[in-house]
Image (tube, grey):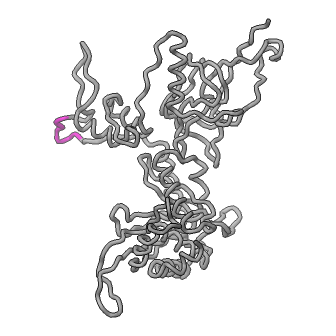
Amino acid sequence: MTNPTRVVQEFRLPDLGEGLTEADWVQWAVEVGDRIELNQTIGEVETAKATVELPSPYAGIVTELLVEPGQTVPVGAPLLRIATEDGPAEASGGGSASRPSVLVGYGPGDAPQSRRAARRASADTARAREVDPPTARPDAKPGARKLAALLEIDLDTVTGTGRGGVITRDDVRRTAAHGEGPAAGPGDEPAAASPLPRTPGPSVERTTRIPVGGVRKRTAEAVSRSAFTAPHATVFLTCDATATVALVSTLRASPAFEGVHPTALSIVSRALLCAIADEPSLNAHWDDDADEIVLHHDVHLGIATATSDGLKVPVVREAQRLSLPRLASSIAEVADRARTGRVTPAELTGSTVSVTNVGVFGVDAGTPILNPGESAILAVGAISDRPWVVDGALAIRKIVTLSLSFDHRLVDGEQAGRALATIGAVLGDPVPALLAGM
């Protein structure tokens, strides 16, 4: 009987979609010598859109890791080499790989494993080889790992306060500020509580340098490109949202919204869709190459979301087709996926208009920057009790300020003003416009 031949397969960074050309390598979930299974997670990359776990397209033994954490890797660059058993030598064409390429993350009959499952599999394999399993790395956000390396903080000494005990940037900063860190070993010099000088002289500048990469770097590039490409203008409207606040309370008790948590942002988003129906130029983009304005028939609504890794804009597809309950649940779902790092690059690309809720931070108004390729973005300020004139008399009402930034190449001030007035009118009397599509 012929022994199977081993073929060394080279796994290269795949095209993660949506025009991404490179990614930052965050961490490995495997080590040289590990036996891995098809679709087992081998590590994480941080793209311009999200942090993504990469599954292996091969089963075999890891022979070489070719990139280091923190390294920027172009699409197509080799990541690691895996020795696979490719069947009897005489059937393998002299040792050449005969295994068909497998779509990354979708092997035949298998689903991708989670990072923790991958680590457990590696540890079980190590025990089977009667060697000590590798020490599990602390679970930390990519940005936290970079900051910890910069500040020379051992992540094993940091207590994570994120979801599931994940270490965040704030956890690392807190550890550095309190002087916590690894204890000095025999013969070691005492470790400093912080890389910053304790008693700086008058000429010493206290600074911390943080490498820029991943989502933060791409966000900076995108907003810079947008700010210096599209001529921005912004219109503001302060309006009475008392009826909207009351409607949200009513909807939360409605059987139609069972399992859904509608918010004022849900109502504002539907109001924006109503405005786009009257002013379609808000749902368009400027094609520089063709010198044309492209009007989108479907509204792919971007929801600006603050995360520990930076600003992300997950997308609710074809929002104009959704009922109010479905729109509310979709907004909550995509925002939660973005905040917890479960969103994919494809889910963060393709928005045609966006909304950002700066009111959650207690901010009354702002002038948001357009997402590249969009013609409008709506910012929603804090809803608060303020004096307001109602029927000629002062009253305390729920007041909100809206700001609509737009690309003045394809949206005129008149169109933007009418659109914002429509949104304000819907918030003042939401029932007719919003419940018609339920």
Task: Write the residue at 56% across / 65% down.
Answer: 353
* Residue sitting farthest toward the front: 255
Q: Nearer the viewer, residue 392 or 293?
A: 392
Query: In the figure, residue 107 lies in which quadrant?
Result: top right
User: Would residue 106 appear left or right of 307 to someone viewing this image?
Assistant: right
Q: How far across and how far down the image is residue 378, in percent? A: 48, 69
Does residue 201 show up magenta in the picture?
Answer: yes
Residue 218 on image: x %, y %: 51, 48
Above or below for 222 versus 163: below
Q: Residue at x 28, y 25 (%)?
A: 182
Q: Which residues are magenta?
A: 198-204
Residue at the extreme bottom: 392
- Where on the picture, by quarter, is residue 86? top right
Residue at 52 percent of width and 15 percent of height: 126
Using the rendered view, name the quadrant where residue 414 is placed: bottom right
**Residue 140, placed above or below residue 6:** below
Residue 263: say if magenta: no
Q: Is residue 210 visible?
A: yes
x 43%, y 64%: residue: 357
